[in-house]
Image: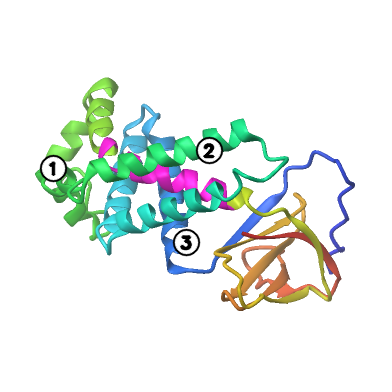
Amino acid sequence: MAKPAGKVAAGSAIEFAHYEQPLSERMRTFLRLEYLYQQMLYHSDGDADWATRSTISTLLEILAILSRGDVRSEVHKELDHQISALERFQAHHGVDGGRLDTIMHNLSSSRDEIVSIGTGFLQPLKDSDFLNAIKHRSAIPGGTCEFDLPEYSHWLRQPLQRRQEDMATWIHCVRPLCDAVTEVLWLIRESAQPNEKVAINGMYQHSMQKDSNCCLLRVSIAPGSNLFPEISGSQHRFTVRFLEWSTTESRAVQTGHDTPFQLSIC
C-alpha cells in the first residue's frame, strides 16, 4: 500500500507534477496543439535524420488538427475573451499596470497576427507534393521507409542547414497560431491560484458554481509519489481519483489513503 503523500511546507520551492483536464472541446484542441508544438520544436533542433523525421511527423499531426474545424477562429475568440477580461482589471487598485500592459500588448499582437495570416494560412502545406506524399504513406505502418519514399530519404541525407531551412518554411505556416495557443494557455493557467485539498481515501469530488466559467483543471502533486490522478467530469461537477502505480504489468488501483494535493480551477 502506498504511503500518503506528504504535505509540502509553505514557501518550499518544489516543482510539482501537474496533471490537467480540459473542460471544453476548445481546450482539448489547444492542449493537443501545445503538446505537439513543443514536441516539434524540440526535435527540429536535432541534427540526426531521426529527429528530422519526428519533426515532420509532428508537423503533419498539427496540420491534421488545424484542418479540422475552424481552429483559427477559436483561437481568435479566446484571445478576444482574454483581452476583454484583462481590460476589466485596468481600473483596479493594486494591479501591476506595467505587467498588465505587457500581457495585453502580447495578446493584441497575437490577435493581429492571427488576423493577418488569413484563412488560407495552411495552403502552402496542403499544396506541397513533398509533404503530401509523406502524409499519405504515414497512414501505413513503416510506410515512410526508404524503398517507399526514396525522395524523402534523399532529402533526409541533405546537410542539416538545408533541412532546417525547409522545416523553418513549413513551421512558419503554423507558428503564429501555435504561439498564440501557447500564450493563451499560459494565461489561463496563471489565472487561478492553487488551493490545498485532500482526497479522502483517494477520492475528491467537486461541484462548480452555476456561473462558473472554468475551462481547465490542474491537479498538482509532489514529485516522487507513486500516485497519479484520474480526472473525470464536466464544467458542472468533477471527480479526482488517486491511483497507485507500481509497474506496467499490474493495473493501477485507487489508494485507500487520504491524499493531499493542490487544485487549480482555471
Q: Nearer the viewer, residue 66 or 235?
A: 235
* Left or right, residue 64 beside residue 92: left
What amino acid is found at the position of numbered circle 3 in the picture? Met
Measured along the vertical axis of the image, is residue 166 above or below residue 116? above
- The residue singled out by tag 3 in the image is 27
- The residue singled out by tag 1 in the image is 130
Q: Nearer the viewer, residue 218 or 190?
A: 190
Q: Main secondary structure of the magenta part?
A: helix
Q: Quadrant of residue 264?
A: bottom right
Instruction: Give how far apart the Cα atoms at labels 1 and 3 are.
Output: 32 Å
- In the rendered image, residue 82, in percent from the top left (x then y), is placed at 49, 51
- The residue singled out by tag 2 in the image is 103
Q: Is residue 165 visible?
A: yes
Q: Quadrant of residue 266?
A: bottom right
SS at mark 3? helix
What amino acid is found at the position of numbered circle 2 in the picture? Ile
Mark 2 is surrounded, within 10 Å at the Cα level, by few (under 14), some (14 to 19) or many (20 or more) other residues, namely: some
| 2 or 3: mark nearer the eye | 2
Q: Residue at x 54, y 64 (%)?
A: 215
- In the image, residue 114 lies in the stretch drawn in magenta: no
Q: Quadrant of residue 201?
A: bottom right
What amino acid is found at the position of numbered circle 1 in the picture? Phe
Instruction: Give how far apart the Cα atoms at labels 2 and 1 are.
Output: 39 Å
Q: Is residue 40 visible?
A: no
Q: Nearer the viewer, residue 138 or 145?
A: 138
The part of the chain drawn in magenta is 172-188
SS at mark 2? helix
Q: Residue at x 34, y 45 (%)?
A: 177
